Image (spheres, rainbow, N blue to C red):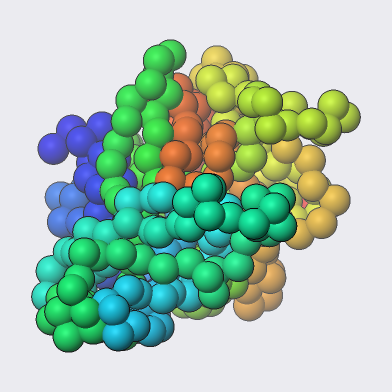
Amino acid sequence: MDSKDFLHKLLLTPSPTGYEQPVQRLVRQRMKRYADSIETDLHGNVIVALNPKAPRKVMLAGHCDQIGLMVRHITSDGYLYVSALGGIDVGVLHGSRVTIHSDKGAVDGIIGRKPIHAQTGEERDKTKNDIERVWIDIGAKDQKDAERRVSIGDVATFHLSVLELGNQLVSAPGLDDKVGLFVAMEVLRLCSRKKLNVGLYAVSTVQEEVGLRGATTSAYGINPEVGIAIDVTHASDNPGNENAKATPCKLGSGPTICAGPNINPVVEKMLRDSAKKTKSSFQISPSTRPLGNDANTIQVARGGVAAASIGIPNRYMHTQAEVCSYKDIELAIKILVHFVTSITSKTDFRPL
């Protein structure tokens, strides 16, 4: 399959947090022809390596898990009540198509909503929704009919689809963070054609959405010198951005390179230099605190890691209609390939 097909297959493969095995199987199948080794650890992280005998190690992390739902109750009428897996925005759930990924197969459903005609004034004005009041309708006649198809503990995602928009934009649930996973694997694929001075580890990390857990365990196991998280970041170029003083972040203007205490200054400078040398546009994303992505925990693994973060601008994060730019994805890959191949035996990542 070509690279774009691989990205689309990632987006069409379910991986709710804690249940990432289907997408991890796809990663292993894709990368086996390019890697020197592939390992799945006990946590479920898939670690794809080039030149693993090299003493210096660079880790690229893209988390494969996506937000989802878990069935917690089936009513006598056959409706499903759910709990959130990760940071669900309950406000976008009502009326959505979802898929329950049952041992019995995929089951389509919709999330019900009291019609506006029947809502009280308080219900119409309420902006904060309660997931305890959200139900899934799978068209079951009653509880027994529902239980023939689904079970308590089954997980669900938004209906998985890919929609291409104008100006090289793509929309899908799960762009957070399958675009980052895709970038990490594409960098390794392209680096497999080159001579490296380091061992390169592209990691499809698990359970980022519930506490950066996969990056914690995989970074400990790999013990890299450099670790770069590749994740989505909030785009500001839409009417929902009301903070005129926020740092701008636009789709199609290149990936972001983070700056701040979570970021090793040597790696940051090398990433900026790589962008300039490959004539790749980029944006700066400043953060005065540790980041909310895998770079946070990678930085403090074992004795410390030279950490950095690349962001792919994303509109409507954690909804069923996230939007990213193919151009930003491609530029992130170019920057990272140059960065990895520019490391020599003399490169010193200590912030002196």
Residue 162 is at least partly visible in this image: yes
- Above or below residue 151? Residue 115 is above
Q: Nearer the viewer, residue 49 or 56?
A: 49
Q: Position of residue 217 (x, y in %)?
A: 50, 77
Q: Residue at x 87, y 29 (%)?
A: 245
- Above or below residue 329? Residue 6 is below
Q: Residue at x 55, y 39 (%)?
A: 316
Q: Is residue 71 left or right of residue 245?
A: left
Q: Position of residue 285 (x, y in %)?
A: 73, 37
Residue 223 is at least partly visible in this image: no
- Above or below residue 101? Residue 152 is below
Q: Residue at x 79, y 40 (%)?
A: 286
| Viewport quadrant of the N terminus | top left
Q: Residue at x 29, y 48 (%)?
A: 160
Q: Is residue 251 left or right of residue 107?
A: right
Q: Position of residue 256 (x, y in %)?
A: 63, 34
Q: Position of residue 121 (x, y in %)?
A: 69, 53
